[in-house]
Amino acid sequence: MTSPVTGYTHEPAYDSGHLKVGSIHEIYYEQYGKKDGLPVIYLHGGPGGSTSPSNTVFFDPSAYRVILLDQRGAGKSRPRHELRENTTQFLSNDIESLRKHLGIARWHMVFGGSWGSTLGLFYAQSHPTSVRSLVLRGVFLVRRDELLVNNAPTAALFYPQEWDAFVNYIPEDERGDIWDAYHRRLTSEDRETAVAAANVWNFWDLGVGNLLPNKEAVAKVKDPDWSLTHALFESHYLYQNAGFMEDGELLFPENMRKIRNILGVIVQGRYDLVCPPKTASDVHKAWPNSSLHWVDDAGHAPTEPGTLAKLVQVCDDIAKL
Protein backbone atom coordinates (compact mmCIF):
# COMPACT_ATOMS: atom_id res chain seq x y z
CA MET A 1 0.00 0.00 0.00
CA THR A 2 1.34 3.45 -0.89
CA SER A 3 0.53 7.14 -0.75
CA PRO A 4 2.33 10.17 -2.25
CA VAL A 5 3.63 11.12 1.19
CA THR A 6 4.52 7.99 3.16
CA GLY A 7 5.60 5.51 0.50
CA TYR A 8 5.56 1.75 1.12
CA THR A 9 5.41 -0.21 4.36
CA HIS A 10 7.54 -3.36 4.70
CA GLU A 11 7.46 -6.30 7.02
CA PRO A 12 10.55 -6.70 9.24
CA ALA A 13 13.75 -7.82 7.55
CA TYR A 14 13.65 -11.47 6.53
CA ASP A 15 17.45 -11.75 6.62
CA SER A 16 20.41 -9.91 8.13
CA GLY A 17 24.05 -10.54 8.76
CA HIS A 18 27.66 -9.45 8.67
CA LEU A 19 30.00 -10.07 5.75
CA LYS A 20 33.74 -10.02 6.39
CA VAL A 21 35.55 -7.81 3.90
CA GLY A 22 39.30 -7.68 4.28
CA SER A 23 41.29 -8.08 7.46
CA ILE A 24 39.57 -5.38 9.52
CA HIS A 25 35.96 -4.81 8.51
CA GLU A 26 32.65 -6.66 8.61
CA ILE A 27 29.78 -4.94 6.79
CA TYR A 28 26.20 -5.26 8.02
CA TYR A 29 23.25 -5.81 5.71
CA GLU A 30 19.52 -6.48 5.87
CA GLN A 31 17.04 -7.80 3.30
CA TYR A 32 13.39 -6.79 2.95
CA GLY A 33 10.52 -7.31 0.56
CA LYS A 34 10.09 -10.12 -1.96
CA LYS A 35 12.74 -12.83 -1.63
CA ASP A 36 12.74 -13.53 -5.38
CA GLY A 37 12.02 -9.92 -6.33
CA LEU A 38 14.02 -7.38 -8.32
CA PRO A 39 17.22 -6.73 -6.34
CA VAL A 40 17.84 -3.13 -5.31
CA ILE A 41 20.59 -1.89 -3.03
CA TYR A 42 20.10 1.29 -1.01
CA LEU A 43 23.28 3.33 -0.45
CA HIS A 44 23.07 5.67 2.52
CA GLY A 45 24.53 9.13 2.70
CA GLY A 46 26.98 10.88 4.93
CA PRO A 47 29.57 9.50 4.54
CA GLY A 48 29.11 7.96 7.94
CA GLY A 49 25.34 7.67 7.92
CA SER A 50 23.58 4.35 8.35
CA THR A 51 20.47 2.50 7.24
CA SER A 52 17.15 1.89 8.96
CA PRO A 53 13.89 0.17 8.00
CA SER A 54 12.51 3.58 6.96
CA ASN A 55 14.85 3.49 3.96
CA THR A 56 12.63 0.85 2.35
CA VAL A 57 9.71 3.27 1.79
CA PHE A 58 10.65 3.91 -1.86
CA PHE A 59 10.30 0.29 -2.95
CA ASP A 60 7.18 -1.82 -3.57
CA PRO A 61 7.60 -4.94 -1.39
CA SER A 62 5.59 -7.00 -3.87
CA ALA A 63 8.16 -6.23 -6.58
CA TYR A 64 11.54 -5.57 -4.96
CA ARG A 65 14.09 -7.48 -2.94
CA VAL A 66 15.55 -4.59 -0.94
CA ILE A 67 19.08 -4.72 0.45
CA LEU A 68 20.22 -2.17 3.01
CA LEU A 69 23.96 -1.88 3.63
CA ASP A 70 25.80 -0.06 6.40
CA GLN A 71 29.08 1.10 4.92
CA ARG A 72 32.43 0.34 6.54
CA GLY A 73 32.74 1.69 10.06
CA ALA A 74 29.15 2.98 10.16
CA GLY A 75 25.85 1.79 11.63
CA LYS A 76 26.00 -1.85 12.64
CA SER A 77 29.12 -2.59 10.59
CA ARG A 78 32.16 -3.52 12.63
CA PRO A 79 34.39 -2.03 13.99
CA ARG A 80 32.61 1.30 14.48
CA HIS A 81 34.43 4.55 13.57
CA GLU A 82 37.32 2.67 11.93
CA LEU A 83 39.16 4.81 9.33
CA ARG A 84 41.78 2.28 8.28
CA GLU A 85 41.05 0.60 4.93
CA ASN A 86 38.14 3.00 4.54
CA THR A 87 38.11 4.67 1.12
CA THR A 88 35.64 5.03 -1.72
CA GLN A 89 37.29 2.16 -3.58
CA PHE A 90 36.91 -0.14 -0.58
CA LEU A 91 33.22 0.80 -0.24
CA SER A 92 32.64 0.11 -3.93
CA ASN A 93 34.35 -3.26 -3.65
CA ASP A 94 32.12 -4.08 -0.67
CA ILE A 95 28.97 -3.57 -2.77
CA GLU A 96 30.29 -6.01 -5.33
CA SER A 97 31.30 -8.50 -2.64
CA LEU A 98 27.81 -8.30 -1.13
CA ARG A 99 26.19 -8.82 -4.53
CA LYS A 100 28.15 -12.02 -5.00
CA HIS A 101 27.58 -13.15 -1.41
CA LEU A 102 23.81 -12.83 -1.86
CA GLY A 103 23.84 -14.66 -5.21
CA ILE A 104 22.57 -11.67 -7.19
CA ALA A 105 23.49 -11.80 -10.88
CA ARG A 106 22.93 -8.07 -11.41
CA TRP A 107 21.37 -5.25 -9.42
CA HIS A 108 18.07 -4.25 -11.01
CA MET A 109 18.65 -0.91 -9.32
CA VAL A 110 21.34 0.89 -7.36
CA PHE A 111 19.70 3.70 -5.37
CA GLY A 112 21.71 6.43 -3.67
CA GLY A 113 21.23 9.95 -2.40
CA SER A 114 23.75 12.62 -1.44
CA TRP A 115 26.98 10.71 -0.63
CA GLY A 116 25.06 7.61 -1.70
CA SER A 117 24.82 9.12 -5.19
CA THR A 118 28.59 9.59 -5.22
CA LEU A 119 29.16 6.00 -4.21
CA GLY A 120 26.50 4.74 -6.61
CA LEU A 121 28.15 6.47 -9.56
CA PHE A 122 31.60 5.28 -8.49
CA TYR A 123 30.38 1.70 -8.16
CA ALA A 124 28.51 1.73 -11.48
CA GLN A 125 31.57 3.06 -13.27
CA SER A 126 33.73 0.40 -11.61
CA HIS A 127 31.27 -2.47 -12.25
CA PRO A 128 28.96 -1.41 -15.11
CA THR A 129 27.87 -4.95 -15.96
CA SER A 130 26.55 -5.39 -12.41
CA VAL A 131 24.02 -2.54 -12.68
CA ARG A 132 20.86 -2.30 -14.77
CA SER A 133 19.61 1.06 -13.46
CA LEU A 134 20.90 3.83 -11.24
CA VAL A 135 18.66 6.21 -9.30
CA LEU A 136 20.39 9.28 -7.88
CA ARG A 137 18.93 11.87 -5.51
CA GLY A 138 20.62 15.06 -4.30
CA VAL A 139 23.58 14.44 -6.59
CA PHE A 140 27.07 14.99 -5.20
CA LEU A 141 30.47 14.44 -6.83
CA VAL A 142 32.81 15.77 -4.10
CA ARG A 143 34.10 18.48 -6.42
CA ARG A 144 35.85 21.36 -4.70
CA ASP A 145 33.29 23.92 -5.83
CA GLU A 146 30.47 21.77 -4.45
CA LEU A 147 32.03 21.65 -1.01
CA LEU A 148 33.27 25.21 -0.59
CA VAL A 149 32.84 28.67 -2.07
CA ASN A 150 35.27 31.20 -0.55
CA ASN A 151 36.16 28.53 2.04
CA ALA A 152 32.57 28.11 3.22
CA PRO A 153 29.72 25.84 2.11
CA THR A 154 27.06 27.33 -0.15
CA ALA A 155 24.53 26.94 2.67
CA ALA A 156 26.47 29.49 4.74
CA LEU A 157 25.11 32.21 2.44
CA PHE A 158 21.58 31.28 3.53
CA TYR A 159 22.26 30.30 7.15
CA PRO A 160 24.88 32.85 8.25
CA GLN A 161 24.13 32.67 11.98
CA GLU A 162 24.28 28.88 12.01
CA TRP A 163 27.55 28.99 10.06
CA ASP A 164 28.97 31.51 12.54
CA ALA A 165 28.11 29.11 15.37
CA PHE A 166 29.99 26.33 13.54
CA VAL A 167 33.04 28.53 13.02
CA ASN A 168 33.01 30.09 16.48
CA TYR A 169 33.19 26.70 18.18
CA ILE A 170 36.84 26.61 17.09
CA PRO A 171 39.22 28.99 18.91
CA GLU A 172 40.17 31.99 16.78
CA ASP A 173 43.83 31.03 16.53
CA GLU A 174 42.86 27.71 14.84
CA ARG A 175 40.43 29.07 12.26
CA GLY A 176 43.06 29.36 9.52
CA ASP A 177 42.02 25.82 8.58
CA ILE A 178 38.75 25.14 10.32
CA TRP A 179 38.37 21.69 8.72
CA ASP A 180 41.69 20.49 10.14
CA ALA A 181 40.75 21.96 13.50
CA TYR A 182 37.52 19.96 13.55
CA HIS A 183 39.29 16.81 12.34
CA ARG A 184 41.77 17.00 15.21
CA ARG A 185 38.89 17.07 17.65
CA LEU A 186 36.89 14.35 15.89
CA THR A 187 39.90 12.02 16.01
CA SER A 188 40.76 12.89 19.61
CA GLU A 189 41.36 9.97 21.95
CA ASP A 190 39.20 11.82 24.46
CA ARG A 191 35.67 10.71 23.56
CA GLU A 192 34.01 13.70 25.22
CA THR A 193 36.04 16.06 23.03
CA ALA A 194 35.26 14.09 19.89
CA VAL A 195 31.51 13.81 20.53
CA ALA A 196 31.20 17.48 21.46
CA ALA A 197 32.80 18.54 18.17
CA ALA A 198 30.66 16.01 16.28
CA ASN A 199 27.47 17.44 17.73
CA VAL A 200 28.34 20.96 16.61
CA TRP A 201 29.29 19.62 13.18
CA ASN A 202 25.99 17.75 12.80
CA PHE A 203 23.77 20.57 14.07
CA TRP A 204 25.20 22.59 11.21
CA ASP A 205 25.15 19.83 8.60
CA LEU A 206 21.70 18.42 9.33
CA GLY A 207 20.08 21.78 9.96
CA VAL A 208 20.31 23.00 6.35
CA GLY A 209 18.88 19.98 4.52
CA ASN A 210 15.19 20.89 4.36
CA LEU A 211 13.53 23.69 2.44
CA LEU A 212 11.38 24.44 5.49
CA PRO A 213 12.79 24.30 9.05
CA ASN A 214 12.55 20.81 10.50
CA LYS A 215 13.64 20.28 14.10
CA GLU A 216 13.33 16.51 13.70
CA ALA A 217 16.16 16.59 11.15
CA VAL A 218 18.75 16.98 13.93
CA ALA A 219 17.25 14.33 16.23
CA LYS A 220 19.99 11.84 15.32
CA VAL A 221 22.52 14.04 17.10
CA LYS A 222 21.10 12.70 20.38
CA ASP A 223 22.80 9.38 19.59
CA PRO A 224 26.49 10.00 20.36
CA ASP A 225 27.71 7.00 18.35
CA TRP A 226 25.76 8.06 15.27
CA SER A 227 26.82 11.67 15.69
CA LEU A 228 30.51 10.83 15.99
CA THR A 229 30.53 8.42 13.03
CA HIS A 230 28.68 10.86 10.79
CA ALA A 231 30.91 13.85 11.50
CA LEU A 232 34.14 11.83 11.58
CA PHE A 233 33.50 10.17 8.24
CA GLU A 234 32.35 13.36 6.55
CA SER A 235 35.58 14.96 7.68
CA HIS A 236 37.69 11.95 6.66
CA TYR A 237 36.14 11.48 3.23
CA LEU A 238 35.20 14.97 2.13
CA TYR A 239 37.52 17.51 3.74
CA GLN A 240 40.64 15.46 4.39
CA ASN A 241 40.71 13.24 1.29
CA ALA A 242 38.39 14.78 -1.36
CA GLY A 243 36.46 11.55 -1.70
CA PHE A 244 39.71 9.71 -2.56
CA MET A 245 39.23 10.91 -6.15
CA GLU A 246 40.62 13.49 -8.53
CA ASP A 247 38.53 16.64 -8.70
CA GLY A 248 35.63 15.93 -11.06
CA GLU A 249 36.74 12.33 -11.65
CA LEU A 250 33.23 10.91 -11.85
CA LEU A 251 32.43 13.26 -14.75
CA PHE A 252 35.53 12.45 -16.79
CA PRO A 253 34.27 11.45 -20.27
CA GLU A 254 36.04 8.10 -20.12
CA ASN A 255 34.23 7.32 -16.86
CA MET A 256 30.79 8.47 -18.00
CA ARG A 257 31.17 6.30 -21.12
CA LYS A 258 31.38 3.26 -18.84
CA ILE A 259 27.73 3.75 -17.78
CA ARG A 260 26.32 4.69 -21.18
CA ASN A 261 24.18 1.53 -21.24
CA ILE A 262 22.87 1.93 -17.69
CA LEU A 263 19.47 3.57 -17.29
CA GLY A 264 19.81 6.64 -15.10
CA VAL A 265 17.16 8.62 -13.25
CA ILE A 266 18.09 11.76 -11.31
CA VAL A 267 15.76 13.40 -8.77
CA GLN A 268 16.90 16.79 -7.49
CA GLY A 269 15.43 19.31 -5.08
CA ARG A 270 15.48 22.74 -6.70
CA TYR A 271 16.55 24.43 -3.45
CA ASP A 272 19.15 21.90 -2.30
CA LEU A 273 21.74 23.87 -0.30
CA VAL A 274 23.81 20.80 0.59
CA CYS A 275 24.38 19.39 -2.90
CA PRO A 276 24.16 22.24 -5.44
CA PRO A 277 21.54 21.48 -8.12
CA LYS A 278 24.01 22.32 -10.88
CA THR A 279 25.72 19.01 -10.17
CA ALA A 280 22.58 17.07 -11.09
CA SER A 281 22.40 19.01 -14.34
CA ASP A 282 26.09 18.36 -15.07
CA VAL A 283 25.65 14.62 -14.61
CA HIS A 284 22.51 14.55 -16.74
CA LYS A 285 24.20 16.42 -19.60
CA ALA A 286 27.12 13.97 -19.53
CA TRP A 287 24.84 10.91 -19.45
CA PRO A 288 22.54 10.60 -22.48
CA ASN A 289 20.76 7.58 -21.01
CA SER A 290 19.55 9.56 -18.00
CA SER A 291 16.47 11.63 -17.16
CA LEU A 292 16.41 14.54 -14.73
CA HIS A 293 13.41 15.38 -12.54
CA TRP A 294 13.32 18.66 -10.62
CA VAL A 295 11.32 18.90 -7.41
CA ASP A 296 10.41 22.57 -7.22
CA ASP A 297 9.33 22.63 -3.57
CA ALA A 298 12.21 20.71 -1.99
CA GLY A 299 15.69 21.08 -0.59
CA HIS A 300 18.07 18.19 0.09
CA ALA A 301 16.17 15.76 2.29
CA PRO A 302 14.65 12.63 0.69
CA THR A 303 11.66 12.80 3.05
CA GLU A 304 10.35 16.12 1.75
CA PRO A 305 6.91 15.31 0.26
CA GLY A 306 7.66 16.19 -3.36
CA THR A 307 10.96 14.34 -3.40
CA LEU A 308 9.55 11.26 -1.69
CA ALA A 309 6.60 11.12 -4.08
CA LYS A 310 8.84 11.41 -7.15
CA LEU A 311 11.25 8.75 -5.89
CA VAL A 312 8.40 6.31 -5.21
CA GLN A 313 7.05 6.96 -8.71
CA VAL A 314 10.47 6.44 -10.29
CA CYS A 315 11.02 3.14 -8.46
CA ASP A 316 7.52 1.96 -9.43
CA ASP A 317 8.30 2.71 -13.06
CA ILE A 318 11.65 0.91 -12.99
CA ALA A 319 9.97 -2.15 -11.45
CA LYS A 320 8.10 -2.53 -14.75
CA LEU A 321 11.27 -2.88 -16.82
Image (tube, helix red, strand yellow):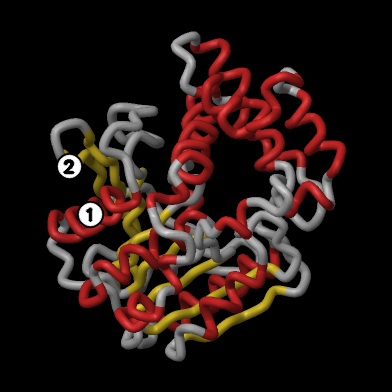
| Above or below: residue 193 compared with residue 139 | above
Counting every numbered tag in the picture gives 2
| Above or below: residue 18 compared with residue 90 | above
* Residue reaching furthest to the right: 161
* Residue reaching furthest to the bottom: 288
Nearest the eye: 49 or 189? 189
Q: Is residue 143 left or right of residue 165?
A: left
Residue 52 in view here: no
x and y percentages locating residue 68 in the rendered image: 36, 52
Residue identified by numbered label 1? 93
Local crowd size for mark 1, using a 10 Å CA cut-off: few (<14), some (14–19), many (≥20): some
| Above or below: residue 293 compared with residue 243 | below
Nearest the eye: 61 or 251? 251
x and y percentages locating residue 128 in the rendered image: 26, 75
**Amino acid beneath label 1:** Asn
The quarter in which the C terminus is drawn is bottom left
Local crowd size for mark 2, using a 10 Å CA cut-off: few (<14), some (14–19), many (≥20): some
| Secondary element type, mark 1 | helix
Residue, x 31% and y 48% (percent of image)?
A: 30
Residue, x 29% and y 27% (percent of image)?
A: 79
| Secondary element type, mark 2 | strand
Q: Is residue 133 left or right of residue 214?
A: left
Residue, x 70% and y 34% (percent of image)?
A: 203
- The part of the image, by quadrant, that contains residue 271 is bottom right
Nearest the eye: 270 or 17? 270
**Amino acid beneath label 2:** Val
Residue identified by numbered label 2? 21
- The part of the image, by quadrant, that contains residue 257 is bottom left
| Above or below: residue 66 compared with residue 193 | below
x and y percentages locating residue 109 in the rendered image: 35, 72
Residue, x 36% and y 67% (percent of image)?
A: 110
Cβ atoms at labels 1 and 2 below 8 Å apart: yes
